[in-house]
Amino acid sequence: MTDLAIADIVSRFKVHGNIVSAKPFGSGHINDTYRVITSTGNSYLLQKINHFVFKDVPGLMNNLVNVTRHLKEKLKSIPGSDPEKQVLTLIENNDNGYFTTDAAGNYWRVFLFLDHTKSYDQVLTEKQAFEGGKAFGRFQALLADIDRQLIVDTIPNFQNVEFRLANLDKAIAADPAHRLSKVATEIAFVNQRRTAMHRVLELGRAGILPERILHYDTKFNNVLLDEHDHAQCVIDLDTVMPGYVAYDFGDAIRTIINNAPEDEPELDLIKLNIPLFTAYTKGYLKQTAAFLTEAEVNSLIEGALLLPYIQGIRFLTDYLNGDIYYKINSPWHNLQRAKAQLQLVKKLEEAKETLNGIILKAWQHEIK
């Protein structure tokens, strides 16, 4: 993006002052983001929405407007809260909407930049894990009473294990990259767990688990912390959709509990960080125990196993399809990722009883 092109896009929004600088910002892989500073000292985030990933951008933006409005209204009634700091603020365009399009058909939006905040790509301390749990738990708690009819699915079937397995089966049947012979062990591992990994979906369809409004991308760098490492604001709200709380809990645990990188080639190095799991769980249930049902609490451990299983399936599917979705740095990168995620599933299965005990103990502590 040239400075002139950025200036043209920004001029369509109700920002204060003229652009002084505009530089790429953040480590996101989906949307292109720039931090814009103006002559009045105001800072904004200009973002190009990836409409190849998000097919319904107007629906997505309506979600954002409804969710941020609901969060701010809820926080206004909570003593000590600061809605303008604790919730993202969308900037209106000059026609009182919240996005614009350029000549190439790209969609753009602007947020107010939250100064004096930071994020971490990796959880390093129990305090950080606890704050992450609090942040995502509070996010769910504040949205527990939002009208779910206001929220559309921005990526349908995102954590639907049935859908992900169907995609894997198609890749196995077609074998377009002629790699099927290399993944017999991984396919056998997946197949052995097909029935068990449908449990959350089946409980939901039976009405035992209620649908909630979820974040759906609960990695730690989607929490902004203040200068004291206290959680301040949950960001990256593009995937906010209805679903089961086990999904968000499991996705967070997938990234927090694993000491090794997501694509660790040495599987013996994949080990569980129980203290970080415990801290996140305590923070999460501190915010959610008051509204979660017992069935939802019991489903959290299932989510912890399910989400790395789903992610492993997605990597394995992409490997079989010839690496058409995820960026890779070698021809076997997706296979390496799949092996690591499935190894994490194995480790979680071995510790399932211990981990579930931690969940139930934290829940009992909060509901006393």
Image (cartoon, helix red, strand yellow):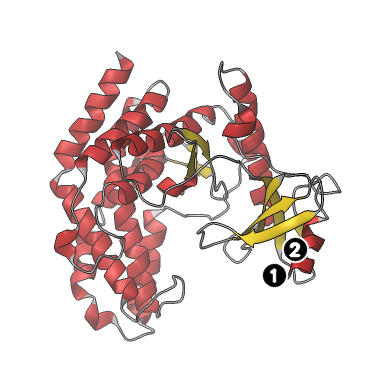
Q: Give the percent coordinates (x, y) of residue 288.
A: 41, 27
Task: Tell me: residue 6, above or below residue 241.
Answer: below
Which amino acid type corresponds to the residue marked 1 in the rendered image? Met
Figure quadrant of residue 151: top right
Residue at 38 percent of width and 77 percent of height: 329
Tally of marks: 2
The single residue placed furthest to the right in the displayed view is: 95
The single residue placed furthest to the top in the displayed view is: 368
Image quarter where the C terminus lies is top left
- Do we see residue 147 in this rendering? no
Q: Which mark is residue 250?
A: none
Proximity of marks 1 and 2: CB atoms separated by less than 8 Å: yes
Task: Tell me: residue 191, above or below residue 303.
Answer: below
Q: Give the percent coordinates (x, y) of residue 103.
A: 80, 70
Task: Tell me: residue 334, above or below residue 252.
Answer: below
Image quarter where the N terminus lies is bottom right
Judge by depth and name the residue closer to the eye, 270 or 185: 270
Figure quadrant of residue 46: bottom right
Residue highlighted by disc 2: 6
- Do we see residue 139 in this rendering? yes
Q: Is residue 210 left or right of residue 197?
A: right
Q: What crowding class fits label 1: few (fewer than 14 Cα within 10 Å), some (14-19), or many (20 or more)?
A: few
- CA distance separating discs 1 and 2: 7 Å
Which amino acid type corresponds to the residue marked 2 in the rendered image? Ile
Q: Is residue 41 left or right of residue 253?
A: right
The single residue placed furthest to the bottom in the displayed view is: 178
Residue highlighted by disc 1: 1
Is label 1 in a helix, a strand or a loop? loop
Residue at 26 percent of width and 26 percent of height: 362
